[in-house]
Image (cartoon, rainbow, N blue to C red):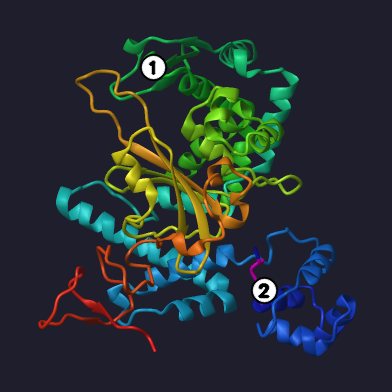
Amino acid sequence: MRLRKIFAGDRLRRLREQHGTTQAALAETLEISPAYLSQIESDQRPITRRLLKRLGDLYRLDANYFADDDDLRLASELRESASDPMFGTAAFAEEATAAVRVAPAIAQRFLYLYRAHLALEEEHRSLQMLIMHDDMGAASRFPYDEVRDWVQSNRNHFAVLDRAAERLAAAKSFSPENRGEDFARYLRDAYRIKIDHAAEALGSGMIWRLDRNSRTLFLSKDAPAESRIFWIAHVIGLHEETETIDRQVRQARLSNNEAAALARVALANYYAGAIVMPYEPFLRAARETRYDIERLQRRFGTSFEQVCHRLSTLQRLSSPGIPFYFLKIDIAGNVLKRSSATRFQFARFGGPCPLWNVHQSFAQPGRILVQLAATPDLTTYLCIARTVGLSAGSYLNRPRAVAVGLGCEIVYASQTVYSKGIDLEDVGAADPIGPGCRACERTECRHRALPPIGRALDVGTAERGVVPYRIETKT
């Protein structure tokens, strides 16, 4: 499998200028000609692996500094946002990509303003409908979106929490066989908080509640053991790493208190996953089992969803796992969680592509579905999907139908058990999926729900296809 060429001339030029280095001086340090460096900075030539290593050593760069994954996601979101009808003419993919390459900070500021505009519109509609009289103050970004973007900007990996959880798990010898008892004992001994499985102590719809007055953590007795263990680990994280979590939230510079509160929950959940599945032991087990999710479930006493999410966080610089994307959706297509350590692009507006196997999993509950899928940027992924969810606990309740999706680029697929029986070289057999109809560039797709942004439509009356319009092809 050939490695993708990296064109990051603008980023290299900005890096050089930040360090006050001339083109000739940097070329001499890299042992290349100034003309060659000029071609790299103008994106006429890619950055070779040898130069990537030299630049990383010279400027002490992260291994992913020149990767274009984040730029692609940013450009996709910029194109969607800039093609809102309020702006008139829609933006093309090439324009968005060029804007991100030349001025990524300006692109981020534009998206920040556009999200603020959407939040203001939403609050205005709410005010009109509810005729609210409270002083609401200034409108803000949607907290969930803001926290999602922040987690994504960290590639869903928080090294300081990972290492802290790993140290505590090793120091206290927490083991999968007795983890529930070990966690409960540690919470009691370290923080004088006891556990009670009393359903009547919880409010309607609640799954756990921490009563600080009685220093009791009430857990739903209807929940499976792996969920109760995870909730105890969450509370341990809130107490054990209070300062670390608060520092991470402050550094995120989120726009309001709601977003900050959601970020604390996200970080406590991250810590819970890290202490239940400590990084190095979990990564070793993942490699030994060829990333077999069900075997990892049994080994660590966790749920299918917990394993999938943990696999998507294994991006420690010194020992990274496979870069996975992770997605959780409900049966209506609403995205509940999403993150990606890959170049995979999630649509911000509208639901995911209907050809994606994560939708098909609802028709086959409990079964793991495997799919080869190709995105419009010609990247092929191995995609895994399965329904998950808690029991409703009662016939009178309604169970929540949700599914998770996990996937990696095809170059990593052979390392997983899910590639067995699949011809990874036959990329033509991959299903053509996209980030969502509004952002998808495929013009011949018969599964469209909406036309793509930025394309003229031909709604003829003399003929009719499955989709009631033709999309003008760019020349």
399 relative to 161 in the view: left or right: left
Q: Position of residue 210 (x, y in %)?
A: 45, 19
Q: Residue at x 25, y 18 (%)?
A: 394
Q: Quadrant of residue 442?
A: bottom left
Q: Which mark is residue 220?
A: 1
Q: Quadrant of residue 114?
A: bottom left
Residue holding disc 2: 11
Q: Position of residue 202 (x, y in %)?
A: 34, 17
Stretch in magenta = 2-8
316 falls in the magenta region = no
**The disc labelled 2 sits on which kind of residue?**
Arg
Residue 416 sits above or below residue 253 on the image: above
Q: Quadrant of residue 239?
A: top right
The chief SS type of the magenta part is loop
Label 1 neighbour load within 10 Å: few <14, some 14-19, many 20+: many
Q: Nearer the viewer, residue 419 or 31?
A: 419
Q: CA distance from mark 1 to mark 2?
A: 51 Å
84 relative to 79 in the view: left or right: left
Residue 59 sits above or below residue 89 on the image: above
Residue 414 sits above or below residue 110 on the image: above
Q: Position of residue 271 (x, y in %)?
A: 59, 33
314 relative to 368 in the view: left or right: right
